[in-house]
Image: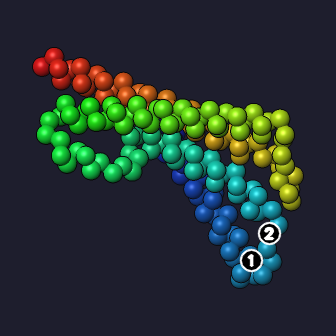
Amino acid sequence: MNKFASYLLTGLICLVAGGQFVQVITRYVLEIPVMGLEETLLYPTMWLYMLGAVNASRENTHIRANVLEIFLKTKRQVVGLAIVGEVLSLIIGGWLTYWAWDFTKYSLRVWKESPTLYLPTFYVDVALITGMVLMMIYTAMHLVSHIRDLATDEEQ
């Protein structure tokens, strides 16, 4: 799974960077903009953004300001703080996932299309709910891991 995720994210970032490169060259150097390129780049960009967040959640490498850890003395306190953080992340993430689900239902019902190429934007919008659900799964897995760490620490 790690290898697949890294290949997928690498492919998406290369696609987005390549598309932006083509856009800059054709628009500003050759002065012939490619119509609809921005619309097509929306798909890999949104999926890259959401799957990048999922990857950070999977690896537990989100940017955090762990200032409180400086003042904590024991491993048990640090794990307790991590549990509180994961629970808060699940609560807020669950709320955002609910909103993403409502948006996905709306997007499916309305079935919007892009203005130039008439591509269905549902496939961009579904990245949001997919990413949120996967992030909540990984957050729950990290919460369980922290609880296990706390339980094994108490046994010793």
Q: Position of residue 138 (x, y in %)?
A: 45, 32
Residue 21 occupies which quadrant of the picture? Answer: bottom right
Amino acid type for the residue under numbered disc 2 = Val
Q: For the point 57% across and 56% down, which residue is it?
A: 13
Does residue 85 appear to the left or right of 90 in the view shown?
left
Q: Dot 1 surroundings within 10 Å: few (below 14), some, or many (20 or more)?
A: some
Above or below residue 29? Residue 90 is above
Does residue 60 appear to the left or right of 37 in the view shown?
left
Q: Are marks 2 and 1 in contact (CB under 8 Å)?
A: yes
Q: Quadrant of the C terminus?
A: top left
Amino acid type for the residue under numbered disc 1 = Arg
Residue wearing tag 1:
27
Residue wearing tag 2:
34
Q: Dot 2 surroundings within 10 Å: few (below 14), some, or many (20 or more)?
A: few
Residue in the foreground of this view, choosing between 31 and 99: 99
Q: Quick one: label 2 or label 1, which is nearer the N terminus?
A: 1
Q: In this figure, which colouring scheme has been used for the structure? A: rainbow
Residue 14 occupies which quadrant of the picture? Answer: bottom right
Q: Position of residue 78 (x, y in %)?
A: 23, 37
Q: Position of residue 73 (x, y in %)?
A: 13, 40
Q: Is residue 11 visible?
A: no
| SS class, disc 2 | loop
Q: Is residue 153 visible?
A: yes
Q: For the point 38% across and 40% down, which residue is it?
A: 60
Q: For the point 20% across and 34% down, which residue is it?
A: 77
What count of labels does the image hold? 2
Q: For the point 48% across and 42% down, which residue is it?
A: 55
Distance Cα–Cα, label 2 vs label 1: 7 Å
